[in-house]
């Protein structure tokens, strides 16, 4: 999906007018008329989301938004997402694109006028004022600060080491260097102060402690020696910020995708992870829950009452399916994955392969609209965007 900002000179301008005019939202006709009359200044823009040459959403960047003599500037407005693309956090992506544009123009804040409560707050906006609009309605003005953001390092993978038996007990091997994983991870670790493992089952305390020690063993074998090792589960969920602020490396454990998703949502983990400056490694379910959209195929194939699509943390823009070589042997789960692919691109990684930010290392297949296409192979790397 591509999001671009348009001015009247853009060839898509007329096409967007038609789309806005025909969309079921009554404000769409207002936007269409503004575009016909070119009621936009030089720097104001209409942002449009496009998937396979199809318009699926829009919003605007303007200096004002219906509030006379308003002291605030600029505004994002006219936010609309096609019904078939709702539930995929496209509104947030449109807002983020507007914010990047505003940031390039050296604005420090972005504003929204709305009568909705509890909607834009989840995107980081806060109420700062109320005012009467040009139609005499009382509206709320929300603000989000435009901050400088450092690029975050996120690994998404199926697994990072092998299980083995040592003296009759479960043990882990050193971290895998298949497709250069360990080498790339070491390059991203700035300090070796605190290692944090975020559990998938927040109530399995004994199991979580056991796997923390196994992770410590695997890290030590890999010549990574942290001063402190912490597990994040229900015992310290009220101190999530304190725990993560110490982290030099965070691993999101594998497990039950749905249960982990609920735990991550409860503690607002995505918000906290976005503010830390250390590499994050999502393993299996942990990798899936990093995306904006999560395909809950494994758990739904066992329990049809569960939802197929979940809201993820959004620390990666990619929707992944791990252990793909195994899932291809499960017809029920593959049917669900193919179903989900009708509306979104899914990156299916095999064991030993991974994504590092926007780059794939190792075997990965793109699943989209029911078609499976190999885009990277073992020993190769592939940049998803430039």
Image (tube, rainbow, N blue to C red):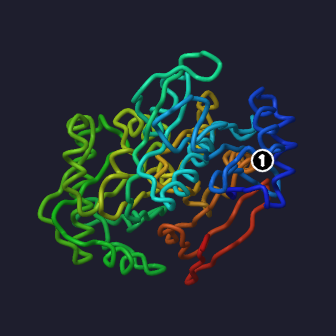
Pick out the residue farthest to the left: 227
Packing grade of label 1 (10 A; few <14, some 14-19, many >=20) is few
Q: Is residue 369 above or below residue 132?
A: below
Tell me the SS state at disc 1.
loop
**Is 110 positioned to the left or the right of 195 in the image?**
right
Residue 64 place in picture, x, y as percent: 58, 38
Q: Residue at x 23, y 34 (%)?
A: 238
Q: Quadrant of the C terminus?
A: bottom right
Q: Residue at x 60, y 77 (%)?
A: 382
Task: Mark yes or no: residue 160 visible.
Answer: yes
Residue 57 figure quarter: top right
Residue 82 place in picture, x, y as percent: 75, 38
Residue 292 place in picture, x, y as percent: 54, 48
Q: 211 or 32: which is nearer to us?
A: 32
**Is 214 positioned to the left or the right of 273 in the image?**
left
Residue 3 figure quarter: bottom right
Task: Mark yes or no: residue 297 visible.
Answer: no
**Is 353 positioned to the left or the right of 11 in the image?**
left
Q: 368 or 34: which is nearer to us?
A: 34
Q: Residue at x 49, y 24 (%)?
A: 140
Q: Quadrant of the N terminus?
A: bottom right
Determine which residue is flagged by label 1: 38
Residue 151 place in picture, x, y as percent: 41, 65
Residue 385 figure quarter: bottom right
Q: How many marks?
A: 1
**Is 227 positioned to the left or the right of 48 in the image?**
left
Q: Residue at x 77, y 40 (%)?
A: 34
Q: Is residue 3 above or below residue 89?
A: below
Pick out the residue farthest to the front: 69
């Amino acid at each position: 999906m591509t999001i671009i900002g348009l001015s009247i000179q853009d060839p898509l301008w007329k096409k967007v007018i038609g789309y806005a005019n025909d969309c079921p939202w009554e404000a769409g006709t207002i936007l269409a008329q503004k575009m016909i009359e070119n009621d936009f200044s030089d720097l104001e823009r209409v942002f449009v989301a496009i998937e396979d040459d199809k318009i699926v959403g829009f919003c605007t960047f303007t200096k004002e938004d219906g509030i006379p003599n308003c002291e605030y500037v600029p505004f994002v407005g006219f936010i609309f997402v096609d019904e078939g693309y709702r539930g995929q956090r496209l509104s947030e992506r449109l807002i983020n694109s507007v914010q990047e544009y505003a940031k390039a123009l050296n604005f420090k804040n972005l504003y929204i006028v709305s009568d909705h409560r509890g909607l834009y707050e989840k995107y980081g906006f806060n109420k700062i004022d109320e005012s009467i609009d040009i139609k005499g309605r009382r509206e709320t003005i929300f603000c989000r600060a435009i901050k400088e953001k450092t690029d975050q390092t996120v690994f998404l993978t199926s697994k990072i080491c092998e299980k083995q038996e040592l003296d009759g007990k479960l043990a882990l091997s050193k971290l895998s260097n298949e497709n250069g994983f360990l080498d790339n991870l070491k390059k991203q670790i700035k300090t070796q102060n605190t290692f944090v493992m975020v559990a998938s089952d927040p109530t399995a305390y004994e199991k979580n402690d056991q796997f923390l020690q196994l992770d410590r063993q695997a890290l030590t074998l890999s010549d990574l020696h942290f001063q402190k090792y912490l597990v994040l589960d229900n015992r310290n969920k009220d101190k999530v910020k304190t725990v993560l602020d110490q982290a030099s490396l965070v691993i999101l454990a594998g497990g039950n995708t749905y249960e982990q998703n609920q735990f991550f949502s409860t503690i607002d983990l995505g918000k906290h992870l976005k503010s830390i400056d250390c590499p994050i490694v999502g393993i299996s379910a942990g990798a899936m829950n990093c995306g904006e959209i999560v395909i809950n195929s494994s758990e739904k194939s066992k329990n049809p009452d569960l939802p197929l699509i979940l809201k993820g943390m959004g620390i990666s823009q990619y929707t992944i399916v791990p252990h793909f070589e195994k899932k291809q042997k499960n017809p029920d789960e593959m049917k669900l994955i193919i179903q989900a692919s009708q509306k979104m691109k899914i990156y299916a990684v095999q064991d030993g392969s991974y994504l590092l930010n926007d780059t794939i290392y190792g075997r990965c297949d793109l699943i989209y609209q029911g078609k499976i296409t190999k885009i990277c192979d073992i020993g190769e790397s592939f940049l998803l965007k430039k």
